[in-house]
Image (cartoon, rainbow, N blue to C red):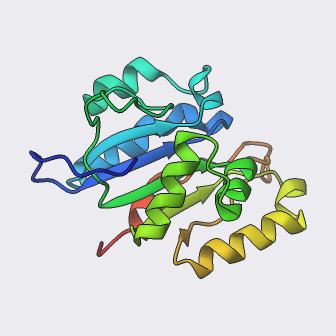
Amino acid sequence: MIERVEGSEKPFLYVVVCAAGVAAGVGELIEAAQERGWETGVIATPIATGGFFDIAAVEARTGRAIRSAWRSPDDPRPFPAPDAVVVAPATFNTVNKWAAGIADTLAVGTLCEAAGLGVPIAVLPCVAGGLAAHPAYQESLARLRGMGVRFGEPYSGEPGPGGGRPKFPWTTALDLLEGV
């Protein structure tokens, strides 16, 4: 999963995208990361590749194919090893599976391995209030924080005063990685 490939002088950022409606804006995170000097590659959960964001636009922006499945042993290494990882948006399912070590997708397997290797990880949760209150989710957050994972403020997507939904704080993930 995490492998070093020669050739890039810029730090490499894995962007893990989960299936949440706000995933459509992931290009904003990628653009901001590139402006801050990161080279980027996207790993998406299998469900996220089913229309949650514009795959062609993201691939054009990063210059790399989006990964959502493991490569076979004969396939070339698509990404260098990460210098850091951002998970945005991070769903209830992904956070809980990651904290439990259930590496049943490339995205969660990559997160498990990156955490084990001490790679800096920033997470922007996108979890509705009812799910965020679930005891398993709260335990997962505590476990991941104990592993050094950095979390942004939770985003529920709930309409605020006046009815509009707040903007997803994409660049907060990069702020959490400052100094990496």
Q: Residue at x 24, y 49 (%)?
A: 35
Work out whether residue 163 or residue 115 is closer to the camera in this orientation and state it. 115
In the image, residue 166 lies at what x, y percent?
Answer: 66, 49
Q: Give the vertical position of 136 relative to 59 (above or below).
A: below
Q: Is residue 15 visible?
A: yes
Quarter placement of the C terminus: bottom left
Residue sitting farthest toward the bottom = 146
Q: Residue at x 61, y 81 (%)?
A: 146
Q: Residue at x 82, y 60 (%)?
A: 132
In the image, residue 6 lies at what x, y percent?
Answer: 12, 47
Q: Is residue 155 visible?
A: no
Instruction: Say left or right for 89 vs 15.
Output: right
In the image, residue 129 lies at what x, y percent?
Answer: 85, 56
Instruction: Say left or right for 88 vs 10.
Output: right
Q: Residue at x 67, y 37 (%)?
A: 20
Q: Give the vertical position of 46 relative to 132 (above or below).
A: above
Q: Give the vertical position of 151 relative to 51 (above or below).
A: below
Work out whether residue 125 or residue 78 is closer to the camera in this orientation and state it. 78
Instruction: Say left or right for 160 vs 107.
Output: right
Quarter-wise, where is residue 63 in the image?
A: top left
Instruction: Say left or right for 149 vs 153.
Output: left
